[in-house]
Amino acid sequence: MTNLKGKTLFITGASRGIGKAIGMRAARDGANIVIAAKTAEPHPKLPGTIFTAAEEMETAGGKALPCVVDIRFEDQVEAAVAKTVEAFGGIDILVNNASAIHLTDTVSTPMKRYDLMHQINTRGTFLCSQKCIPHLEKAVNPHILNLSPPLNMEAKWFAPHVAYTMAKFGMSMCVLGMAEELKSKGIAVNALWPRTTIATAAVRNLLGGEKMVQASRKPDILADAAHAILTKPSRECTGNFFVDDDVLRAEGVTDLSGYAVDPKAELMPDFFV
C-alpha cells in the first residue's frame, strides 16, 4: 500500500502540532481523519481548534470529522468512536498522540499534574485502543501508532522527571503488550518518537522558548515517518519502537535538512533516545 486514500484515521490531539501534521499528511492522500481533541474554542496561547484543523484537512484533500473529546473520559471516547463508524463505516488506524507533559522532579510535581499525565498518556492510550480494537479487527490493514519513546530502562531518563517518564513509558508498554496480544488479529501496534525536539507549541511555551524551536525539526518529519509506517503491511510490521529519522532513511530519504526549522542550527536531541 503506498497511500492512505479512503482510510479512516482516529487521531487523538490532532488539533495542532504533531497530531495535526499526521492528519494533514493523510488528508493529502484523500483519507478520512477524525480529529479527537479538546480544543473547540480558540486558546489564548495555542493556535488552532478541532474546527480549523478540520478545514485545513478538507482543503488538503481529505474528509475530516472534528470531535470534542477529552480522552480521560470513557463515555466521550466511546461517543467519538461511534460517531466515526457512523460517518465513515469503520476505523483503519488509531494514532495515540494526545499527551500531557510536566518536567519536574518528584517533590516539585503536583499530584494534579501527575494524575493528568497518567490519565492522558498511559490511560488515555489504553482506553482509545480498547474502544478502537473491535473496529480495527474488521479493517484490511489495521494499525495502532503511539507517539511514545523506545523503552530505554536507564536511570538517566527517569531521574529528572520520573512522573513524566512513567506516563510516556506507559504508552510504550501498551505497544509492547498489545503488539503481541493483537498479532493473531493482524493489527499492527508500533511506537514512533523523534530524534530531536519538534517545533510545537509545547516546545515553545513549556520547554525552551523560541531558541529551542530554532534548534528543532518541524512536525512534518513525524508526519512523513508515520505515513511510511501506516502504509506498511500490518502483519509484517508490528512491535517496533521507531525513531523518525531512522524510518525515513530506511525509505531512502538521505537529506533531512528540509525538516529543520533552521538548517544552520545545531539540533537539540529529544529525551529517551
Image: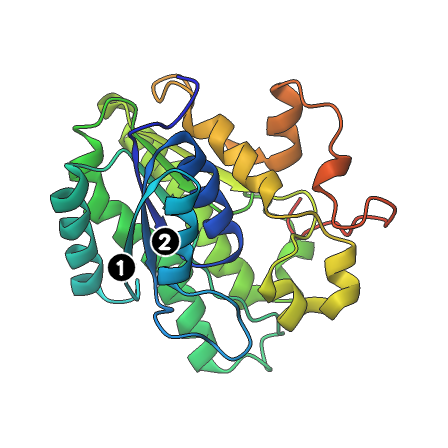
Q: Which of 234 and 3 is in front in this view?
A: 3
Image location (x, y in percent) of residue 33? 33, 44
| Quadrant assignment for the N terminus | top left
Q: Is residue 267 above or below residue 177?
A: below
The residue that disc 2 covers is 54
Q: In which quarter of the image is residue 59?
A: top left
Image location (x, y in percent) of residue 105? 63, 74
Q: How far apart are marks 1 and 2 (CA)?
A: 10 Å
Image location (x, y in percent) of residue 148? 50, 47
Among all residues in the image, which is located at the extreme front? 59
Q: Which of 182 and 10 is in front in this view?
A: 10
What residue sits 55% from the left and 76% below the top?
45
Q: In this view, does 173 lie above or below 205?
A: above
Image location (x, y in percent) of residue 66? 29, 57
What's the residue type where badge 2 is placed? Ala
Q: Nearer the viewer, residue 109 or 265?
A: 265
Q: In this view, does 70 lie above or below 176?
A: below
**Residue 166 shows in the view:** yes
**Residue 14 shows in the view:** no
The numbered mark at residue 67 is 1
- Dot 2: what SS? helix
